[in-house]
Image (spheres, rainbow, N blue to C red):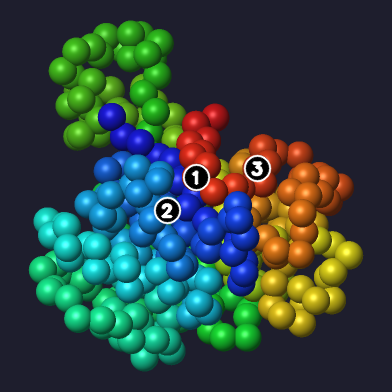
């Protein structure tokens, strides 16, 4: 049975708190695991969340500020210590190659796993698998930063009443799905289009075209909201979003489930992020993230 869920490992911004670890987010998607922005302490948070090194297939780093990447050294070494049997691919801004190299080889250890380096240098498609396409978009931050977007291929939903009306049953249903036609019956006769699910991960950035492109039509959007709206000038200066800005992006993009995260330690009331997001007009499902939270990708409508 396929599982699609987000496991939140950390939700702090630059400074961790007693209750918030540095960043870390695992997306489970049909037997694969994509780890986003492993900040300091991610390996321990994985243990607490029941996430094993064997669960990781890709590591996606948005940029090389410490709260988004200092956990790379430990995670990579754990992958090797546990002798993960499959290849693991790492995506990160090409401009930060020197930082990735330092983190990958921060200390002495025995390399036992093939880690494929696949740096990002421009907007576009990074990988295509049977269950998703992974894309990257440039964001606006003081250092080069990319957001990531995962898109499931569109498919077809079989309609039992139409199958029955055309006398298609049993093994013939699978044959029709594979071949597209069974005698005079076509796949279009007994099914309807099924839009693929979409997930996006947007970290440190000001408002820019990349933010809107990543969020468009997402079933689940994980997006930074470092500041509250009254500190919007600070957000712009440091290359971040406010809760209201993030919610307005989600509202305009038709996002179904909005997950706010990456909170500044200056704020003590998480509920204020939700209040400001609602005030911005977002009416979909809304979560103010906290460490070790698990969220399913919304079911298809």
* Residue drawn at (32%, 51%) of the image: 33
Residue 120 x %, y %: 40, 79
Give the distance between the C-alpha atoms of the residues marked 3 and 2, in whole angstroms. 20 Å
Residue, disc 3: 287
Left or right of 291 on screen, residue 122:
left
Residue 75 visible in the picture: yes
Which label belongs to residue 67?
Answer: none
Nearer the observer, disc 1 or disc 3?
Answer: 1
Q: Position of residue 231 (x, y in %)?
A: 85, 69
The local crowd at label 1, few if under 14, some if 14 to 19, many if 20 or more residues have their Cα within 10 Å, is many
The answer to the question of whether label 1 and label 3 lie on touching residues, with beta carbons closer than 8 A, is no
Residues at marks 2 and 1 touching, judged by CB atoms closer than 8 Å: yes
The front one of 35 and 132 is 35
Quarter where residue 239 is shown? bottom right
Label 2 CA crowd tier, 10 Å (few <14, some 14–19, many 20+):
many
| Circles 3 and 2: CB atoms closer than 8 Å | no
Label 2 sits on residue: 45
Inter-mark Cα distance, 1 to 3: 13 Å
Residue tagged 1? 292
Where is residue 100 drawn, in percent x and y? 35, 82
The vertical placement of 290 against 91, above or below, is above
Q: Along the horizontal axis of the image, is 239 left or right of 128? A: right
């Amino acid at each position: 049975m396929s599982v699609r869920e987000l496991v939140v490992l950390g939700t702090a911004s630059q400074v961790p708190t007693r209750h918030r670890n540095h960043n870390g987010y695992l997306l489970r998607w049909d037997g694969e695991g994509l780890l986003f922005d492993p900040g300091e302490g991610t390996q321990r948070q994985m243990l607490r969340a029941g996430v094993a090194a064997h669960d990781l297939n890709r590591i996606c780093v948005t940029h090389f500020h410490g709260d988004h990447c200092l956990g790379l050294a430990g995670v990579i070494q754990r992958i090797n210590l546990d002798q993960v049997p499959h290849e693991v691919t790492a995506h990160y801004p090409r401009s930060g190659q020197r930082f990735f190299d330092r983190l990958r080889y921060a200390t002495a250890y025995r390399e036992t796993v093939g880690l494929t380096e696949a740096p990002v240098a421009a907007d576009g498609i990074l990988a295509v698998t049977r269950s998703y396409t992974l894309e990257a978009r440039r964001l606006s931050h003081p250092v080069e930063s990319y957001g990531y977007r995962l898109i499931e291929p569109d498919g077809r939903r079989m309609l039992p009443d139409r199958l029955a009306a055309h006398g298609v049953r049993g093994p013939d249903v699978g044959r029709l799905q594979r071949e597209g036609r069974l005698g005079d019956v076509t796949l279009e006769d007994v099914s309807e289009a099924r839009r693929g699910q979409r997930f996006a991960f947007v970290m440190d950035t000001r408002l820019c075209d990349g933010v809107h492109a990543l969020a468009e039509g997402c079933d689940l959007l994980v997006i930074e909201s470092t500041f509250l709206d009254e500190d919007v000038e600070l957000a712009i200066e440091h290359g971040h979003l406010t809760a209201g800005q993030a919610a307005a992006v989600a509202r305009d993009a038709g996002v179904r489930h909005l997950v706010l995260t990456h909170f500044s330690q200056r704020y003590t009331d998480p509920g204020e992020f939700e209040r400001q997001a609602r005030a911005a007009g977002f009416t979909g499902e809304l979560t103010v993230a906290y460490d070790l939270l698990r969220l399913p990708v919304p079911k298809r409508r």
